[in-house]
Image (spheres, rainbow, N blue to C red):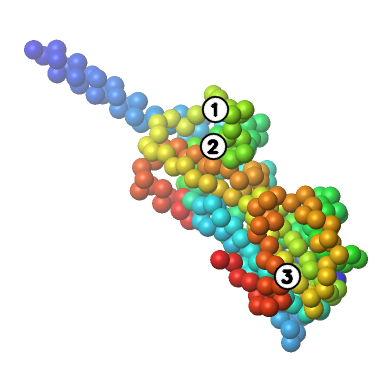
């Protein structure tokens, strides 16, 4: 798994993004997951909240919420001691706080089910699930619900739905 | 007979400075005096939050605040309190919160899912020091 942080702030950021894009254009464009929220901050979400990709594809999270900061953070002990909710051996990630219009990218190579959350909004149910490759029994799911708040647990789409539909949009 | 108009005039003249100085000078303009710090310097949030403005808070008062909110011209528009939903229970009280912003025109109360600094879902209690129409000053 490789990681790449892209900062897209202001005009300079746009230029930087353009040049970065010119260096990294590939047949498989990054798949975008938008970080969004209501103007008053009463509701926040990832869209899509569930997605299936193939090994080697890249996910890019972008903060489109003008009044808030968000993170895309893997459930893994290296991130604040959280219980692992991703394949054993896969490299965890943490975008850190993304201000509006900032983005963060990860290329997924190892098949499996990956759950992630937004650090300041996990208690509001701002979580997401990525299935890489074919459906496999994710060993970590047998470990139970871990230390997640109820709002987060309720928000995850099922692996079956993701496998069947490919993309689960926020509703 | 001339005393009454004179007294009335004195009262009216005397009331003008009270209205003009309704917002205490220490907080009327950004940055407020005292222990207030700009929120975007404390946590990673935009400098100006659409719908609220530029926020300042005394970190010792977190999470409740008061947060002082200013428009693009640095004028105080509201005082905001942020009360975690889980703290609204029989065993917790928020007493004697400071209210340094002066007269209140109207009040908004709404749910917020959280943000850096106050990560748990909470309620925003907004004391607007400006008229409803002037909320537009911090809309964007």
Return the x and y of residue A142 as percentages of the image width and height: 83, 60
Instruction: Kindly identify which chain the residue marked by label 2 belongs to.
Output: B
Q: Provide the secondary structure element on which disc 2 rests.
A: strand
Q: Residue at x 50, y 29 (%)?
A: B99
Front-most of residues A144 and B12: A144
Front-most of residues A74 and A151: A151
Q: In this view, does B98 lie above or below A77?
A: above
Q: Hey, which residue is sitting farthest left in the picture?
A: B1
Front-most of residues A8 and B81: B81
Circles 1 and 2: CB atoms closer than 8 Å: yes
Horizontal side, residue A151 vs residue A87: left or right: left
Q: Quadrant of the N terminus of chain B?
A: top left
Instruction: Kindly identify which chain the residue marked by label 3 belongs to.
Output: A
Q: Which residue is drawn at 68% across and 59% down?
A: A127
- Label 1 and label 2: CA atoms lie apart by 9 Å
- Characterize the local packing of mark 1: few (<14), some (14-19) or many (20 or more) Cα atoms within 10 angstroms: few
Return the x and y of residue B140 as percentages of the image width and height: 48, 56
Q: Residue tagged by mark 2?
A: B81
For the question of whether residue B86 can be seen, the reply is: yes
Q: Provide the secondary structure element on which disc 1 rests.
A: loop
Q: Residue at x 51, y 52 (%)?
A: A40
Residue A159: assigned label: 3
For the question of whether residue A11 can be seen, the reply is: no
- Characterize the local packing of mark 2: few (<14), some (14-19) or many (20 or more) Cα atoms within 10 angstroms: many
């Amino acid at each position: 798994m490789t990681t790449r942080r892209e900062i897209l702030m202001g005009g300079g950021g746009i230029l930087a993004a353009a040049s970065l894009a010119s260096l990294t254009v590939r047949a498989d464009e990054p798949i975008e997951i938008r970080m969004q929220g209501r103007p008053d901050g009463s509701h926040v979400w990832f869209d899509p909240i569930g997605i299936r990709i193939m090994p080697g594809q890249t996910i890019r999270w972008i903060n489109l919420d003008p009044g808030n900061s968000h993170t895309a953070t893997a459930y893994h002990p290296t991130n604040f001691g959280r219980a692992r909710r991703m394949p054993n051996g896969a490299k965890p990630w943490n975008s850190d706080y993304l201000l509006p219009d900032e983005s963060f990218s990860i290329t997924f190579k190892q098949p499996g089910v990956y759950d992630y959350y937004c650090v300041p909004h996990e208690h509001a149910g701002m979580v997401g699930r990525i299935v890489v490759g074919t459906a496999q029994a994710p060993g970590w799911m047998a470990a139970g619900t871990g230390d997640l708040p109820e709002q987060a647990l309720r928000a995850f789409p099922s692996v079956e739905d993701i496998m069947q539909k490919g993309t689960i949009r926020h509703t | 007979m001339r005393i009454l108009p004179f007294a009335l005039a004195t009262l009216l003249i005397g009331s003008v400075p009270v209205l003009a100085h309704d917002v205490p000078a220490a907080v009327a303009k950004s940055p407020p005096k005292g222990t207030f710090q700009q929120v975007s310097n404390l946590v990673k949030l935009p400098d100006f939050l659409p719908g609220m403005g530029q926020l300042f808070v005394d970190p010792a008062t977190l999470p409740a605040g008061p947060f002082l909110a200013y428009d693009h011209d640095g004028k105080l528009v509201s005082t905001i309190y942020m009360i975690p939903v889980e703290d609204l229970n029989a065993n917790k009280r928020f007493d004697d919160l400071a209210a340094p912003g002066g007269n209140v025109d109207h009040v908004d109360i709404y749910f917020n899912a959280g943000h850096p600094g106050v990560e748990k879902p909470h309620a925003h209690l907004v004391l607007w020091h400006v008229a409803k129409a002037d909320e537009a000053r911090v809309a964007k």
